[in-house]
Image (cartoon, grey):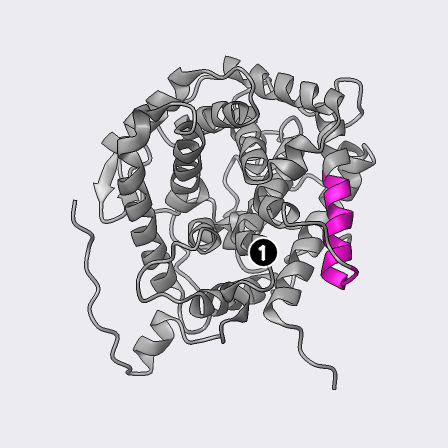
Amino acid sequence: MPDAPSDRTYWAATADRIARPVLAACAAARLHETMPIEVAPGQATSRKAVTHLEALARTLTGLAPWLELPPGDNSTEGKTRKDLTALARRAVANATDPNSADFMNFTRGGQPLVDAAFLAHAIVRAPRTLWAELDDATRRNLVAALKSTRAIKPGMNNWQMFSAMIEAALCATGEAWNVGPVDTAIKNHMAWYKGDGVYGDGPSFHWDYYNSFVIQPMLLDVIETVRRRDDRWNAHHAPVVARARRYAAIQERLISPEGTFPPIGRSLAYRFGVFQLLGQMALRHELPDRVSPGQVRAALGAVIRRMIEAPGTFDARGWLTIGFTGHQPGIGETYISTGSLYLCTAGLLPLGLPATDEFWTDPASDWTSVRAWKGQDLGTDHAIPE
């Protein structure tokens, strides 16, 4: 019997399986031509104008830290990463070139603001791979595409982080950037904080996973990016990190002994993208106290395997289908289509840690809910003070 693949081998193969159809098609300027567009039953609104940018940007926002690692060796993972990196650069070039068959919509409707922000987040996460090593024409086109989204005004909710993320990416690349959207997003989210590591989605609390899909990952990276140029937000940095660590602790406790988690709130078709914040804190080496890298790897790995291996997760050609566990098209909201689903890659952020990192070398260990249901003594869990 061959040895079972290591956790890292499995994660890397999963990243390749998800991303390759998107990146290969867009690198060949054929994403519009070949990607299916599935929507929920009875959904009348076409997502054709926005779903392709969703697919590319969301794929890259999760893969970016992995692609940013030093060039791969001749291992299977190294060759895969090198190949996907080349595809990603060609895909970005085609997506932002007005003369390309795969030129993306950055201005029509509101949705392009969302996915331009995910693309911007990918640039911040991979400044060498997805910015410095692009050719000059692609960099110019990319900046023009990001700036064109300024015409889209965000509402009083998590969308404010999208405008801020785009400006942060422009700041990070040395381009002219606007302070206003950044300042507004940070100030409002600090005001919308509800306590114990959780922000409101706007003034109201929502029991969903948007603290992980958008709010906390972007808030962390926006503040850390712009504070290198402007120190006016420095006082927010420490509390934002402390809140993120607490929310990561909560996320780790939500993973059941069976590798499941509560299907609460909207956008469940993003699958294990739910755990972007937990993965980001692992990537940053800022996991909560009493939460080891080995237990996070085991917990996230259990969720990823359960979801990826559910029958119907992919169609016959390898594209993701709408669903939470397998193919469940009815779970898709009005804004969900095939491209939307690729935010699941955000659950793979720890691939950006090298294979020698303790996240990968620590022995796998029971996560909190496993220990709890085995009757082991956990100690107490408390809200963080404010």
Q: Please check the rendered image and state whether residue 81 is part of the magenta-colored stretch, yes or no.
A: yes
Q: Relative to residue 310, is residue 36 depicted above or below?
A: above
Q: Residue placed at 51% from the left, 36% from the top?
A: 334
- Residue hosting label 1: 351
SS assignment for the magenta stretch, majority: helix
Q: Relative to residue 264, is residue 4 depicted above or below?
A: below
Quarter of the image with the C terminus in it:
top left
- State which region is magenta: 74-88
Q: Residue 137 at what x, y percent from top left?
A: 75, 20
Q: Relative to residue 309, is residue 87 depicted above or below?
A: above
* Image-based side of 243 in relation to 181, left or right: left
Q: Please check the rendered image and state whether residue 202 is part of the magenta-colored stretch, yes or no.
A: no
* Image-based side of 168 in relation to 379, left or right: right
- Please name the amino acid that badge 1 sits on: Leu
Of residues 370 and 318, the one nearer the viewer is 370
Of residues 15 and 158, the one nearer the viewer is 15
Q: Residue 232 at what x, y percent from top left?
A: 31, 24
Structural crowding at the residue carrying mark 1, measured as other residues with C-alpha within 10 Å and reported as few (<14), some (14–19) or many (≥20): many
List the single residue furthest toward the bottom.
1
